[in-house]
Image: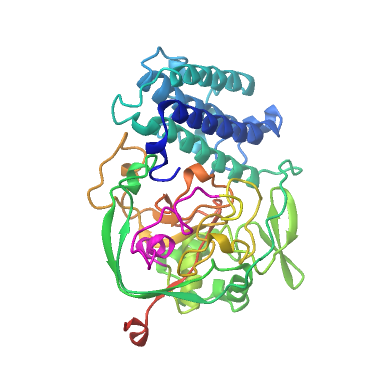
Amino acid sequence: MTDTSIDRLGTEQLRDRIAAELERTRARTALLTDVVDDADLMRQHSPLMSPLVWDLAHVGNQEELWLVRDVGGRPPVRQDIDDLYDAFKQPRRDRPSLPLLPPGEARAYVTTVRDKVYDLLDRVRFTDGRLVADGFAFGMIVQHEQQHDETMLATHQLRSGPAVLHAPPPPEPRASVGGEVLIPAGAFTMGTDTDPWALDNERPAHRVDLPAYAIDATPVTNGQYRRFIADGGYDEPRWWSAAGWAHRVKAELSAPMHWRRDGDGWLCQRFGRWAPVRDDEPVVHVCWYEAQAYASWAGRRLPTEAEWEKAARWDPVTGRSRRYPWGDDDPTAVHGNLGQRHLWPAPVGAYPDGASPLGVHQLIGDVWEWTSSTFRGHPGFTAFPYREYSEVFFGDDYRVLRGGSFGTDRAACRGTFRNWDLPIRRQIFSGFRCARDARPEESRP
């Protein structure tokens, strides 16, 4: 939705829009859980991830807590399972040993909850407080389920066995793109006060003044990253931070996750299938330490979060910050690689319609992009509606990622959306682009 689209919607139109988003999201959840048998749903495919059946019941439990009980004031459906599906009480590695709902019960539970939510949606007044204003609580639940759908997609990438997910390949390049883009010095508006479904860490809007800098026109590609590997990048401590080198040694990193050597080249695994690494696709499944080391090797650095957002949102003609690089309209298939339409990143140049006004491409979709920034609240941040969504993660432990991936849904991705993870994580669909300070002659008006 655009910043003002909900304002233009009447109550019935808003209800219809919410119902459509809930239905569309649940269809994706069903796809991800129906393509495997019950044993596969109950199995833990990696200690980094939950069994798929845990995610399935968890999204229903969150929907029950926030919509059925809180917004609706209705009696609990399954209060007895609240602790089982509390992500803070149950570490991922321990979830397989819990008395989880088996697949049939989990599906019945989420269906029962959803039926109650549809009944509530027919009666709710969107003027009864901040939680329901503009349908926020419903939008929060849609985004929460879509985020877990992307997590389940990452679990599918880690599972062994025959391929079960299918999608057409992403489009071929439509433009020749490369090099870097100079972003002039000056202020821009970061964050938002107006996007109706923006989450607490995206708020409030605030002014940020940046010196001039240059940023890559595209994410770093496999071909570029292969040169780093070939030049001994994984064997040279000088390119790595102390913490990064310690992790590289401990984890025995030598290439992106899911790569393996094939003679003089490389293969990568995508959801149960092996394919040659394609040089013009964005590199994916690298951790923050790897991204930082590559940038150091290339004589560059990772962009700050503010630099990434200015490159993605700032319009030099109007001076305003757009919702997306291309404008305020919702993403379509021509703007970016989102929503699991494809199962890997598109080659650079595939989405010229999604470029920013200054010519920065593929900022939305394809790969989450690591930034140099640690996760903090914007100035004036207020937790809403609960601290555990964002605030408990603030500090030096987590690095911010921006822009979404091919597995991110449009409901959970916009120019202000912020993701975060530990710098060692690479099972997520993570890549990066580089930046640098502008040279003195570039900074002059």
Which residue is depicted at the point 58% across and 59% down? 284
344 part of magenta stretch: no
Residue 16 in percent (x, y) is at: 50, 28
- Which contiguous range is marked in magenta? 303-331
Residue 383 in view of the camera = yes
Looking at the image, which residue sits at the far left? 380
Which residue is depicted at the point 39% across and 20% down? 124
Note whether 253 is above or below 115 in the view shown. below
Residue 372 in percent (x, y) is at: 39, 63
User: Please, which colouring scheme is shown?
Assistant: rainbow
Instruction: Provide the major secondary structure of the magenta segment.
Output: loop
In this figure, what is the number of numbered marks?
Answer: 0
Nearest the viewer among 438 and 252 is 438
Looking at the image, which residue sits at the far bottom? 441
Q: Quadrant of residue 314?
A: bottom left
308 part of magenta stretch: yes
In the picture, the quarter occupied by the C terminus is bottom left
Q: Quadrant of residue 199?
A: top left
Note whether 170 is above or below 75 in the view shown. below
Residue 193 in percent (x, y) is at: 30, 46
Note whether 383 is above or below 15 in the view shown. below
Residue 301 in percent (x, y) is at: 42, 72
Q: Left or right of 183: which side holds 145?
A: right
Nearest the viewer among 440 and 35 is 440
In the picture, the quarter occupied by the N terminus is top left
Q: Quadrant of residue 121?
A: top left
Nearest the viewer among 162 and 219 is 219
Nearest the viewer among 245 and 353 is 353
Residue 96 in view of the camera = no
